[in-house]
Every structure is written in C-alpha cells, then in structure tokens.
Amino acid sequence: MATRDIDKMLRDMAQVRGLKLVKSRRRKPGGDFGRYGLKDARTDKPCFGIGERGLKATAEDVETYLRGQTKAEWKRSLIAPVPAPRPTPRRAKRPVAEPEPVRRPTRRTRAKQTPPPRPVKREAPQPKVELGIREAKGSDARAIAALMEKPPSSRKIAATIAALAKAGKPVFVAEEGGVVGVVSYDAVTAIQRTAPLGRIIFLTTAEPARRRGIGGKLLAQAEARLRKLGCGTIEVVNAIELTNANSFLRRHGFERSGYRFVRDVK
C-alpha cells in the first residue's frame, strides 16, 4: 500500500476514535523521520507515540493501537447493563374509622328519604382488536412514514412498497387498529457465498406498542420469507429503531460480527 493510502487509512481510523493523526515533517532520514503520533482531537493533548524528542511510533504501531481501542470498546458494548430493581412503594395504613351509632328512622326521616337511584345502563364492552401481520399496501405509506425519524415522502414509500412486492420481497406491517410496526428485508447474492445472504434492512414498532412481542413477530415473518428465498445466513443492519435493540437481537439468536463502514455517494 502506498504511503499516501496508509496515511489516509490511519487518519480516518483516528478520526472515528476522536483522535488526530500527527506525522513527522522531516523530509530526510534522521530524528523522527517517518514517525507518527496521536493527539486528542478536542483537547490537542498527546495520546500515543509522542515523546519529548518528537514522534516515535511507526504506522504499524498506530494501526495496532487504534484497532485495539476499537476492540476494547466493542467488547464493552456487548455487556448490557442490568437495571436495578425498583423499590416497591409501601402503602400507608388507613386509620380505621369508628362505626357510627345506628339510629332508628322516625316518621319524618322516612318521609324525607329519597327514592333509590335508577339503574344506569352499561354500554356493551368494545370488542378487543387482534394483532395481525400482513403484507403492506400503498395506502399504508403515510402510517409507515409516521414510524420513521426522517422518512421520505409518502409517494416514495408507496412506490417502494409496490416495487418490493413485485420482486417477491413484500414489506410486512403489524396492524392493531392501525399500523403499529413494519419490517423490510432483502436477499443479496454474494460471490463469496454459496447461498444468498438475507438482510433485515428496517424494523420498527410504534412507541406505545413496544415490549409486547410485536417486533419479534415481524422479525419471524421476515426470516420465514428469507428462508423461502434460499438464504443461508441472515444479518441485521443498524436501521433498527427499537428500544434496547442489542438485547432484542441477542434474545432472537443474533450475534455481533464484523465492522460496517458507510459512505454517501453523491
């Protein structure tokens, strides 16, 4: 790899970690020629490879340090904190009221007694709305957009729903008196794999409907369709808008694997 490419790679890795790459300005051998160091990007304080007489780390040293930082933070993120149990509030004891003496009704009190109240007509209980998982339609576009943080236009969502359904990869929604969740997926044919790779691209549920198993039902529906498409492995990208998504995915058998780099193409 060329020196310019190595410098760019180290600079990008340092920037992700909140650090700044420093390279020796010497153009001839001697001193700290060809050496590197790292500083904190916010405070400009030396972090690695910078001594009193200049820079002293090689490019390999800097790369090893940055990759070690990434692995350490990655391992810490896998340990989900266990929430402390909430103390149960104690109810205050109500004072026991002394019973009032029973008085026999007189003729006057009998005359003043009001007639018993008329029975109140109770309304019939509303039927319970059952949860259902079905394929999304173009008319669901506005409801699906309401579940996204930065959605495209409803017209664009409706067009995407129609295109995926035509390709045999329909979007699924959870309906309970309205759309309360959505999942989108895809099957990717990769040259290094013997079977297509399944991807859960987007999965979310409405805030009031969370922690009720709706996300798991949507995930199971997408997995069943990916198996029909011949996928041998299923991966999840980070567009999962669920509370405590890491615990949710581990609970359904997913393991964290590899790095993911993203760049917008303009």
Image (cartoon, rainbow, N blue to C red):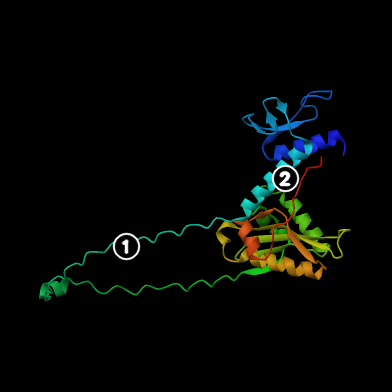
Q: Secondary structure at mark 2?
A: helix
Residue appearing at x 80%, y 67% in the figure: 232
Residue 67 circle label: 2
**Residue 246 position in % (x across, y down):** 63, 57
**Residue 19 position in % (x across, y down):** 68, 35
Amino acid at pointer 1: Arg
User: In the displayed structure, would residue 173 be above or below residue 156?
Assistant: below
Give the mark, 2 or 1, whose residue is nearer the N terminus.
2
**Figure quadrant of residue 108:** bottom left
Amino acid at pointer 2: Arg
User: In the displayed structure, would residue 143 be above or below residue 132?
Assistant: above
Q: Secondary structure at mark 1?
A: loop
User: 66 or 107: which is nearer to us?
Assistant: 66
User: 17 or 100: which is nearer to us?
Assistant: 17
Which quadrant, please, contains the C terminus? top right
**Figure quadrant of residue 131:** bottom right
The crowding category of the residue bearing disc 1, from other C-alpha atoms within 10 Å (few below 14, some 14 to 19, many at least 20), is: few
Label 2 with label 1: CB-CB less than 8 Å: no
Residue appearing at x 70%, y 46% in the figure: 68
Residue appearing at x 33%, y 62% in the figure: 90
**Residue 211 position in % (x across, y down):** 56, 63
Visible residue check, residue 95: yes
User: Could you tell whether 255 is left or right of 120 in the image?
Assistant: right
Visible residue check, residue 175: no
User: Could you tell whether 223 is left or right of 188 in the image?
Assistant: left
What's the CA distance linking mark 2 and mark 1? Answer: 54 Å
The crowding category of the residue bearing disc 2, from other C-alpha atoms within 10 Å (few below 14, some 14 to 19, many at least 20), is: few
**Where is mark 1, residue-wise?**
91
